[in-house]
Amino acid sequence: MTEAEIQKRLEETKAQLRHSKFAFNKKPERKRVEPDSSRAALRNEFVRDADRILYSHAFARYMDKTQVFIMVKQDHISKRALHVQMVSRIARTIGRSLGLDEDLIEATALGHDIGHTPFGHLGEHALSDLLQERGCGCFTHNAQSVRMLQRIEAGGRGLNLTLPVLDGILSHNGEIELSTYRPSPENLDWETMERNTSRCLAEPGYDAKIFPATLEGCVVRVSDMISYVGKDVEDALALRVIKREDMPDNVKKTLGDNNSDIVRALCRDIILNSYDKDHLAFSNEIFSAFSELKQFNMERIYLCQMMLTQKEKFQRSLGALFELYLDDFKKNNKRSSVFMAFLNNMDAEYVESTPPERIVADFISGMTDQFYLKQFERQFMPTSYDYDETEIIHEIRRELPDIDSRWESRNW
């Protein structure tokens, strides 16, 4: 069988699976034209997007980014990488059942949180507050995800993803539960995408006003919440922040008292109430319990004393690092980490067109938890050496005089 015949079979199979008349069924656009399409053989545009995201530096950093609970030594507590895989799995299950484009769903799900700061929403809010205090806009991870993928990855060239994927990432806002999700197809153009991205990083709360242009984007948005609402409960139970009997009775009765039952109930309900429709919808009973569980999580988990204490510490450390990097940039201190670990790998156009405060925000938001902690320790904590360690360090520096710059120039 020839490559062309295999390609035709793949397209026919996808068309059969994407049977809903409400599925996205247009040729997706990229911002930059890519002349050599031969490399894309046997992969459609959305599969290529998923591959580009999967092999990006930013995706690799998911592995050491907080989901909810920070600085906990427990191997089974969710990290951002696990959450993203859960979103992808749940969204593809819903999308497949509704006859939508699974490849568009997968690419959107894999990239939806790629702009998250170290230490999860705690870090996101702290960085946004700092930028607002300086009159430099704000920070939201969904808009930063688009910025990361289109403007920062690949040394400032970006990954040149398709418009429907970027739209789903920008509009995935997973903090607002709705009983009905209706796509806004009028948003699917480059001018609207770029305007909305800019406004999300300039106007606090603007991200809540944006809705996905495709039904596939709506699926990822609701799957984001389905993936974490029960898993956060399990993590809180493992850390003894709550007890299972603390969960609201109506939630336990309607959805269940464990993550498996909660995910199953929510997925089943939205599939049954959305099949062959131009929108997604929960039943009244399930949505009421879903909202009650989210409110319980907010009060008993996300705003618990453990989280509030860590937030205060992070805010102080963030302010110190931000000021240091900003000062280093303005003084053109080439030995600073903001140059060696970030700007030295970026193209000149990015540096020239980006305000200093946003450059520092881009650098910090791309850090993993451990890189952030090591940076703070390196910059603000005294270093302790014993005699042997000191001699080894001096010997290495005599033999490799540029060892410090080699070490710093690694990607974050």
Image: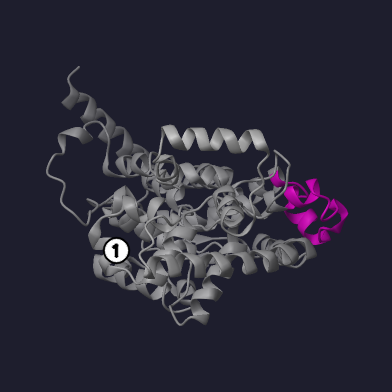
Residue closer to the observer: 407 or 212: 407
Residue farthest along the left direction in this orientation: 35
**What percent of the width, then of the height, locates residue 188?**
29, 64
- Is 256 inside the magenta-drawn segment? yes
Whether residue 171 is visible to the viewer of this picture, yes or no, is: no
**What percent of the width, then of the height, locates residue 222?**
53, 57
**What percent of the width, then of the height, locates residue 226?**
60, 53
Residue closer to the observer: 289 or 103: 103
- Quadrant location of the N terminus? top left
**What percent of the width, then of the height, locates residue 260?**
69, 43
> What residue is at 39 percent from the left and 61 percent from the top?
333
> What residue is at 63 percent from the left and 68 percent from the top?
315
- Is disc 1 placed on a helix, strand or loop? helix
Is 171 placed above or below 132 here? above
Magenta range is: 233-259
In the picture, measured across the screen, residue 388 lies left or right of residue 155, that is right
> What residue is at 17 percent from the left and 20 percent from the top?
2
